[in-house]
Image (cartoon, rainbow, N blue to C red):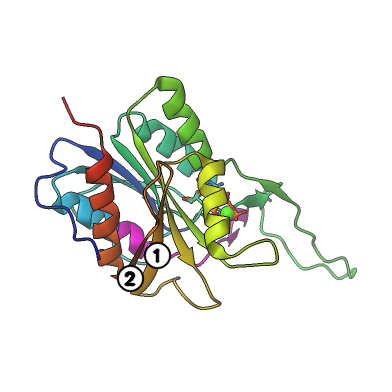
Amino acid sequence: LSAAPANGTLAGRTVTITAGGTREPLDPVRFLGNRSSGKQGVALAQAALAAGATVRFIAAHIEVPPPPGAELTVVETAEELRKATLELAQTSDALIMAAAVADFRPASVSETKVKKRDDGEEPVITLIRNPDILREAVQQRDAARAPQLIIGFAAETGDESGDPLAHGLQKLKRKGCDLLVLNTVGRSLVFGQDSTEVTILDAHGAEPETVSGSKSDVAGAILARIVAVLPAGD
Ligand code: CTP
Ligand code: CA
């Protein structure tokens, strides 16, 4: 287990962290959501604050209190998360995309509550793709030639086309981020749990590093990797 970065090692640095699960409205009272608790994002924010960073915390739906001491932006949908993330990332040394972003949203949102009907017609929900925020953040960074670190998260199960590690390595390449924190999920693992095991994949050639422990241990290990690879400040 790699230790958390020491106090002050991120002084003068700005870290933007997204956390929680986005919610995509169907009508004024209903949404499509996911089970992300936001705990890993909060643990990351606490570790970054402890290391002296300025932390911008972009919270989709979270089930725990936001980290005191961070600059808080609250969002609901993937589109709102996208706008806040792309804006705040522009002036950040690191972006950590710990949020669980809905891949799809309802193609249309009803302005009034959807009611049951008596004619036997049941509603069908048509979904459209949400933007890939992580991918766009990488493109924005590359276009600006900014010396910024971008960290993604992925939860993978194995399937007929590969094991979780293979899927994670493919995703790291596809997204173009610097690190990908890989969770290998079973049916009830990870979401909402206090302890976890992840493998940190590195786009720049470091061997995969497996970290297990509390979400705070995992956050410390991720922050230590950020400290190790951030280009020297002015
Ligand atoms: N992500 C994002 N925007 C999306 C979907 C995901 O920024 N629309 C980010 C997540 O915050 C995470 C990373 O991309 O850091 C990987 O998320 P994941 O859902 O595993 O990736 P997807 O490309 O959506 O792949 P999959 O089809 O396996 O869900
Ligand atoms: Ca996804």
Q: Is residue 66 visible?
A: no
| Mark 1 → mark 2, Cα distance in angstroms | 6 Å
Q: Is residue 132 left or right of residue 111?
A: left
Crowd band around label 2 with a 10 angstrom C-alpha radius: few (<14), some (14–19), many (20+): some
User: Between residues 112 and 176, which one lies in front from this camera angle?
Assistant: 176
Where 40 falls versus 102 (above or below)? below
According to the image, label 2 marks what residue?
212
Residue range (magenta): 24-42
Q: Residue at x 31, y 67 (%)?
A: 215
According to the image, label 1 marks what residue?
198
Res 192 quadrant in image: bottom left
Q: Residue at x 51, y 78 (%)?
A: 188
Q: Residue at x 38, y 61 (%)?
A: 38
Exactly how many numbered labels are in the figure?
A: 2
Q: Residue at x 14, y 53 (%)?
A: 50
Which element is circle 2 on?
Answer: strand
Q: Which quarter shows the C terminus?
A: top left
Residue lying furthest left: 7
Q: Is residue 136 visible?
A: yes
User: Between residues 136 and 57, which one lies in front from this camera angle?
Assistant: 136
Res 46 quadrant in image: bottom left
Q: Is residue 36 magenta?
A: yes
> Where residue 20 sits in the image (x, y, percent)?
42, 58
Q: Quadrant of ligand 2?
A: bottom right
Where 133 falls versus 221 (above or below)? above
Q: Amino acid at mark 1?
A: Val
User: Between residues 141 and 84, which one lies in front from this camera angle?
Assistant: 141
Res 214 quadrant in image: bottom left
Q: Amino acid at mark 2?
A: Ser
Q: Mark 1–mark 2 contact, CB under 8 Å?
A: yes
